[in-house]
Image (cartoon, grey):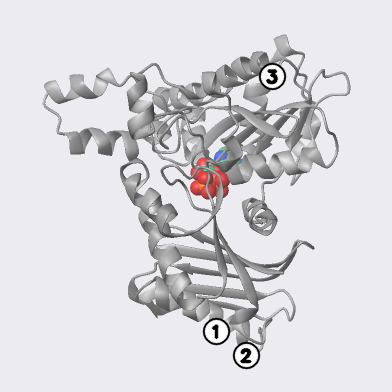
Amino acid sequence: MKILVCNAGSTSLKFKLYEMPECKVLATGKVERVGSADDAIFGYCSCRTGFNIEAAGECIPGYKEGIERFLGCLTGGDGAVLSDISQIERVGYKSVLSKGHYGVHEIDGGVLQGMRDFMALAPVHNSAYLNAIETMQAVLPKAKHVGVFETAFHRDIPMERRIYGVPFEWHEKYGIQRLGYHGASHGYIADVLNAEKKEYGAISCHLGGSASVCGILNGRSVDTSFGMSLETGLIHANRVGDMDPTMIHFLEQEGLSMEEILEGCQKKGGLLGISGVSNDLRYVLEAADQGNRRAKLAVDVFVTGIVHYIGAFFLDLGRLDYLVFTAGIGEHSDRVRNMVCAKLAPLGVKLDEEANRGCRGGAVISAEDSKVCVRVIPTDEELGIARRTCELN
Ligand code: ADP
């Protein structure tokens, strides 16, 4: 079955065409700076023929043109991998959230309405996906369109870890609850571990521009650091993470407008907000090394948060066989992995410093006598989406 996976950003689209269940990538594509009349970037790569385009200065005024350009490459020219776009049976989306639809769903009017209902919780993501899905549905009307919501992997988290201490009617009427994100990534990590072992406790640390920690018991998410929105849990590159809600009211009284407060939480917070240097951890680490105290503080807040959740989830899980690092920071920063693991000695975690420093791609980085196997596993969110899309009956 040919499955197209679509990842939509506010000004970008990424595609991967798979042959499933073989998990074989047939072609990849990307459009950056969608909306530009003369400065968009288009990329396409055919895994069958090796044909590759990387073009800048393109006119791609909207998602429709970007999608059509990619589909045109799939079916025509030297990089073609399909004889007709009708061969694409399913399209899977790395969609974020939809009120009342927290799993993997065939997209219909109700799912799209749920995405509109929760627009305020993920305004950038939901508007991008609504646009991408509606455009794709028009271009591929016969395909099955599947929303693999980022909340899906967490849908079995027990109620006692899901419910906030708010009037219960808020949960019933407005859907207020801890939902969790990065489901495609943590779910992919679980796929890798499931293939090796049936019964295990694992903690997956997805550390990228957004960061979250997830407790996994026997392949299922039992807890996660994200709450209801993406502005929760750990501090992120430029988003706030957990914060006392009363601060919002207080800041308003101090004279800040709601717009300024939201901007602070959603764009000017996190590593950037604390350090004042950058939202990119590499620059924050560099500044910390040069003696910048706020940069050092930002790194310490980030690491302390990760350790905090690992400690809590260890008790929730009751066992810890694997500690996994993934995503941009998790996969590439031996320094952050070292800082986190140094604080986990009480759990019997012992790093093999050399393996950690030399790690490129996936590896076990714990010492032989470590009680917990510490691993770096490069995430593959698209493959996770393709699998879930393929599994849907
Ligand atoms: P996103 O979450 O935006 O999809 P990634 O998972 O690719 O992105 O993570 C991007 C982040 O990874 C960057 O913000 C950068 O700070 C961080 N990063 C990448 N390589 C390193 C490194 N060697 N050391 C520290 N941070 C790194």
Tell me the element at label 2: loop
Tell me the element at label 3: helix
Q: Give how far across and how far down residue 106 sits, in percent.
A: 54, 57
Per the image, the residue denoted by label 3 is 317
Amino acid type of the residue tagged 1 in the rendering: Gly
Residue that protrudes farthest toward the right in the picture:
368
Dot 1 beta carbon under 8 Å from ligand 1: no
Tell me the element at label 1: helix
Residues under labels 1 and 3: Cα distance?
48 Å
Residue that protrudes farthest toward the bottom in the picture:
77
Task: Pick the quarter of the image with the N terminus.
Answer: bottom right
What crowding class fits label 2: few (fewer than 14 Cα within 10 Å), some (14-19), or many (20 or more)? few
Task: Say which of 273 and 246 sits in front.
Answer: 246
Tell how many labels.
3
The answer to which quarter of the image holds residue 12 is bottom left
Per the image, the residue denoted by label 2 is 77
Amino acid type of the residue tagged 3 in the rendering: Leu
Look at discs 1 and 3 and give the one toward the viewer.
Answer: 3
Q: Give how far across and how far down residue 199 sits, in percent.
A: 82, 28
Q: Give how far across and how far down residue 201 sits, in percent.
A: 74, 25
Q: Is residue 55 visible?
A: no
Ligand 1 rendered quadrant: top right
Left or right relative to 141: residue 276: left
Task: Say which of 207 and 166 sits in front.
Answer: 166
- Of the numbered discs 1 and 2, the one sitting upstream in the chain is 1
Amino acid type of the residue tagged 2 in the rendering: Gly
Task: Say which of 43 and 259 sits in front.
Answer: 259
- Of the numbered discs 1 and 3, the one sitting upstream in the chain is 1
Q: Give how far across and how far down residue 120 sits, in percent.
A: 30, 43
Task: Pick the quarter of the image with the C terminus.
Answer: bottom right
Residue contact between numbered discs 1 and 3, judged by CB atoms under 8 Å? no
Q: For the point 33% across and 38% down, which residue is it?
A: 266
